[in-house]
Amino acid sequence: MTQTLSDRVVGVLGTPDAMAKAGAARAVASDWRAGVIPDIGGTAPGDRPKRPAKPELLRPREMPRRGKAQSEAGRIALLHALAHIELNAIDLAADILVRFPDAGMPMDFYNDWLTVLDEEAKHFQLLSVRLGEIGAAYGDLPAHDGLWQAAQDTSDDLLARLAIVPLVLEARGLDVTPTMIKSLRNAKDDDSAAVLEVIYRDEIGHVGIGRKWFEHVCPGDPVAMWQRLVNERFKGGLKAPFNDAARAEAGFGVAYYKALAG
Ligand SMILES: [Fe+2]
Ligand SMILES: [Fe+2]
């Protein structure tokens, strides 16, 4: 029997091996674009995606401090941490496609989040290849176990998911990535910097997609609603400085977030 989109996406979540997960994600996106997946379907995801045996997952306060990007060990630690974030991002993009079947979202919603899914998988692949070039691999170092928390905290409500995952966490990525690119360039690691440039450009698009669908789903004033949801659902608080230019490019203007800056 031909698999539906949700069968395939739940299959991505259920794939433990990281490279196989990325490959499965990209295959779903390309098959969707080619029109060979007949319909969306309604297969439900489990609570947590499957992950590889390595890396070992540690609580945030148990994580060793990362060295400076100037040292090779520091660069490996940075790329490894980013690969781990991208692996989570694959599962987050997959999860939003299948977690809220009752929201009645239009076809364009699926097109957009499959683009995000494909790009997160590409980001993981690029970082894995780059780690290999400098003598390391994803799984070599311990990684942060807190990243799925935001998904669990918002698994009951699509609007809250959109408020927190793309518009807090991915937007935060836009704030911090230019500094990482600069320090990699200073360390003469232009190949790693080039990978982060690709990721940075794509992530502006992801924040834009998040903002678009947040405003689509939001019943009232989106700015007031977003601020309310961030206060209710996001414990960390927002951290300045913000990358206003990149956020604006995503249509996510200062009116949304300036009032919440800690
Ligand atoms: Fe990404
Ligand atoms: Fe992203």
Image (cartoon, rainbow, N blue to C red):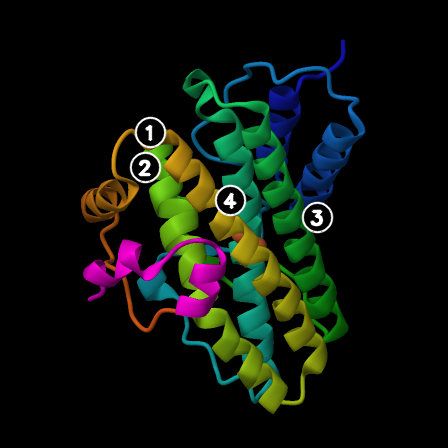
Quick check: is 214 in the magenta stretch? no
Can residue 88 be spotted in the picture?
A: no
Give the answer, above or below, for where 130 lies relative to 169. below
Per the model, the C-alpha gap separating discs 3 and 4 is 25 Å
- Residues in magenta, as a range: 244-262
At mark 3, the secondary structure is helix
Dot 1: element? loop
250 shown above or below 109: below
In this rendering, the count of numbered labels is: 4
Asked whether the beta carbons under mark 2 and mark 1 sit within 8 Å of each other, the answer is: yes
Amino acid type for the residue under numbered disc 4: Ile
Q: Is mark 1 within 8 Å of ligand 2?
A: no
Magenta-span inclusion, residue 259: yes
- Cβ–Cβ below 8 Å for labels 3 and 2? no
Q: Is mark 4 within 8 Å of ligand 2?
A: no
Quadrant, the N terminus: top right
Question: Residue 182, can we see it?
Answer: yes
